[in-house]
Image (spheres, coloured by chain):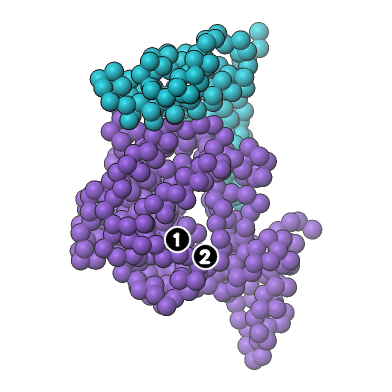
Chain colours: A purple, B cyan
């Protein structure tokens, strides 16, 4: 039996145990989608009988891989998705979380699939998106404002992530990602180490308030159609902290897919800031934005180095991992040098 | 005469894209084939230049370290500089051996750079600028002509 048939059968068994009153449940159209560098992402459909009627659903399975670019907690990602259900921030509905490996050989969670959307970074450049790209870009930063306005107190978020003091946000993140580099670098990283010294010597002003930080907010991590953005995904690095971290990350040069300076290949930085400031009623501190811009290279490099280590140690055979190592580790150094005024 | 290694790797990458890709049906398999081709092209570039890059870079770092010896005040750091620059000849030209030397030199460069940044005076400032120039040059040496970055 092909491997994907085995997974379909295991999923059918699992869903039958979770959907109360279901019988004759079948899983079909299972396929893995590209990307998912931190967690395997699979699509599938399911149909089942319930007393008196037939039901069906389209789902996404996010399954832990043996190793990846990131070591993240699925419970954390699940909690952030759940917290934003029925909010101004569009997210897919969470269904089931499993921390054991008995059902599919690894921990996983399952969510509803938002149908008919694009998500990749190049599709948004296609001709049919040209007339609507400005609207999508505007919506992207309005949704970011909604994420940062979201009242996280009393939600499940508090149970899965610490609440930093405003003047500790930067240190909390920098300590974490420096430690990731310490544990994973295969070779010394003099550019990033110089950047870390600069960051510690020039801490940013504290944020006015602690907000949810998506922490991977960029083109490529939302689901869209010409009609708009329908889902914000990939919350695995989400935490509480300084909202400017998200703006800076979304501006990172590595995501300038059109290589013309437009952030995410869709918007100029000052336009994005203006939209965000209007939506939040707050001003983006440029000094803090620069600090988080430099920090983005530390975090990016930590992610690429973790992947390189995983592949080097034989923990993963996913080719996206060495590809990002070859493509992005040196590029991230170049970005860091430019951010510090030492590049070309 | 046989085709050199980069030519073979570029050839395999081309065959993957022109002969295998049209037969591929699933999105994940399309990604795997295209990543394979891209990686082969990257490795082909690295294969040809790796030893040259490391010899050039090790030489450049040793020169910086030698000049730093009399600028940094830390005696332990001076001792490490002296030990690392005593024998500037690369005795083993295997890429793996050169990489080990490069790792040692870049590790020491990090510590020297940190020390130079906090050392007052014009000589330290000049050396600091030269280290930054070398870091910039190190990224140029590693740049891949992939059209990606």
Residue A331 image-quadrant placement: top left
Q: Position of residue A251 (x, y in %)?
A: 32, 48
The chain containing the residue under callout 1 comes to A
Q: Position of residue A337 (x, y in %)?
A: 34, 33
Q: Position of residue A237 (x, y in %)?
A: 47, 57
Residue at coordinates 61% horizontally, 34% vertically from top-left? Answer: B16
Q: Secondary structure at mark 2?
A: helix
Q: Secondary structure at mark 1?
A: loop
Image position of B10 (left or right of B60): right
Are the residues tagged 2 and 1 within 8 Å (C-beta)?
yes
Cα separation, mark 2 vs mark 1, equals 8 Å
- Evaluate whether residue A112 shows in this view: no
Disc 2 target residue = A76
Residue A72 image-quadrant placement: bottom right
Residue at coordinates 53% horizontally, 72% vertically from top-left? Answer: A94
Classify the position of the N terminus of chain A by image quarter. bottom right
Residue at mark 2 shares a chain with residue at mark 1: yes
Above or below, comparing residue A283 to residue A294 in the picture: below
Disc 1 target residue = A238
């Amino acid at each position: 039996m092909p491997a994907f048939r085995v997974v379909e059968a295991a999923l059918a068994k699992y869903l039958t145990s979770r959907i109360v009153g279901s019988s004759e449940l079948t899983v079909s159209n299972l396929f893995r989608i590209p990307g998912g560098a931190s967690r395997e992402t699979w699509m599938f459909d399911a149909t089942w009988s319930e007393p008196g009627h037939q039901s069906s659903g389209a789902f996404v399975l996010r399954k832990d891989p043996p190793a990846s670019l990131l070591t993240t907690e699925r419970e954390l990602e699940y909690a952030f998705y759940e917290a934003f259900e029925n909010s101004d921030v569009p997210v897919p509905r969470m269904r089931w979380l499993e921390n054991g490996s008995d059902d599919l050989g690894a921990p996983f969670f399952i969510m509803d699939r938002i149908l008919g959307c694009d998500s990749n970074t190049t599709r948004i450049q296609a001709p049919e998106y040209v007339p609507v790209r400005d609207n999508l870009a505007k919506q992207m930063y309005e949704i970011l404002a909604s994420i940062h306005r979201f009242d996280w107190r009393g939600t499940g978020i508090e149970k899965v992530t610490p609440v930093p003091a405003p003047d500790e946000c930067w240190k909390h993140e920098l300590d974490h990602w420096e430690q990731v580099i310490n544990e994973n670098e295969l070779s010394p990283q003099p550019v990033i180490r110089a950047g870390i010294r600069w960051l510690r010597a020039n801490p940013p002003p504290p944020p006015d308030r602690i907000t949810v930080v998506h922490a991977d907010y960029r083109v490529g991590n939302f689901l869209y159609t010409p009609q708009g953005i329908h889902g914000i995904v990939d919350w695995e690095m989400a935490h509480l902290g300084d909202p400017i971290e998200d703006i800076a990350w979304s501006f990172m040069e590595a995501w300038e897919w059109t290589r013309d300076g437009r952030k995410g290949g869709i918007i100029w930085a000052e336009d994005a800031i203006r939209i965000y400031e209007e939506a939040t009623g707050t001003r983006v501190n440029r000094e803090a934005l620069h600090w988080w811009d430099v920090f983005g290279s530390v975090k990016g490099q930590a992610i690429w180095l973790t992947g390189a280590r995983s592949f080097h140690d034989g923990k993963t055979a996913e080719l996206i991992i060495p590809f990002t190592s070859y493509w992005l580790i040196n590029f991230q150094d170049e970005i860091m040098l430019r951010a510090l005024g030492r590049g070309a | 005469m046989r085709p050199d290694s980069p030519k073979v790797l570029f050839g395999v990458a081309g065959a993957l894209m022109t002969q295998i890709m049209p037969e591929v049906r699933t999105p994940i398999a399309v990604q795997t084939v295209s990543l394979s081709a891209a990686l082969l092209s990257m490795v082909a570039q690295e294969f040809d230049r790796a030893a040259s890059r490391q010899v050039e870079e090790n030489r450049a770092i040793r020169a910086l370290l030698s000049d730093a010896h009399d600028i940094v005040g830390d005696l332990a750091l001076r001792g490490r500089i002296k030990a690392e620059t005593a024998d500037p000849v690369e005795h083993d030209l295997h890429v793996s051996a050169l990489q080990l030397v490069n790792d040692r030199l870049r590790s020491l460069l990090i510590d020297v750079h940190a020390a130079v940044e906090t050392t007052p005076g014009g000589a330290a400032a000049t050396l600091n600028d030269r280290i930054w120039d070398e870091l910039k040059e190190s990224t140029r040496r590693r740049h891949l002509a992939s059209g990606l970055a």
